[in-house]
Image: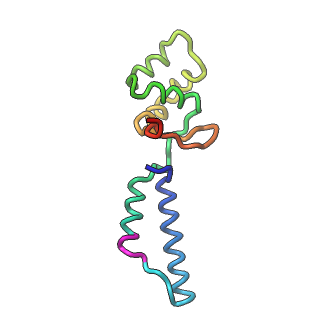
Amino acid sequence: MSNETKRDVFDDLVEELANAYIALDGEGIGEELTNEDKQAYLKDYDNALPDDLPVIPEAVGDILRSAHGQTNFLDVLDTARNGHTISKTLAWIIANQNTFARAWLLGVWRVEETGEIVKLEDEK
């Protein structure tokens, strides 16, 4: 899986189609989009990340990375809610459980501070 989103794949296709149309309209020449090209775009689209990735703070991502595979999701929420001390990071998890859950399930998220896309599979 790349760091390309579905929107990136769509934009690439639109640009290629626009260029082909301009070439056909303006010069009378242009490259037709082949079946192989179409299949490649469909494959890229299927492999692309969702456009609406969860956005989480870097510190929350650190917790997610360290807990994923070592514990289950409910244990993380339980620790966040009933831990000895509630940090700012744990408070964020409690307040944003749905966003944290999406990042946990997808195994990919965007870092709030930098916009970087982080994937759990990259760290194995």
Q: Is residue 19 above or below residue 94?
A: below
The secondary structure that most of the magenta stretch takes on is helix
- Is 35 covered by the magenta stretch? yes
Q: Is residue 58 above or below residue 6?
A: above
Determine the residue positioned at 56% across, 26% down: 92
The quadrant in which residue 19 appears is bottom right
Question: Residue 38, position in %: x, y?
Answer: 38, 69
Query: Which stretch is magenta?
Result: 33-37
Determine the residue positioned at 57% across, 23% down: 89
- Is 42 covered by the magenta stretch? no
Q: Is residue 80 above or below residue 16?
A: above
Question: Residue 27, position in %: x, y?
Answer: 56, 89
Determine the residue positioned at 55% across, 81% down: 22
Question: Residue 57, position in %: x, y?
Answer: 58, 32
**Can you say which quadrant of the picture contains the C terminus?**
top left
Determine the residue positioned at 48% across, 17% down: 81
Q: Residue furthest front?
A: 124
Task: Give the tally of numbered discs.
Answer: 0
Q: Which residue occupies the foreground of this view, 106 or 95?
A: 106
Q: Which residue occupies the foreground of this view, 4 or 51?
A: 4
Q: Residue furthest right?
A: 113
Question: Residue 60, position in %: x, y?
Answer: 54, 28
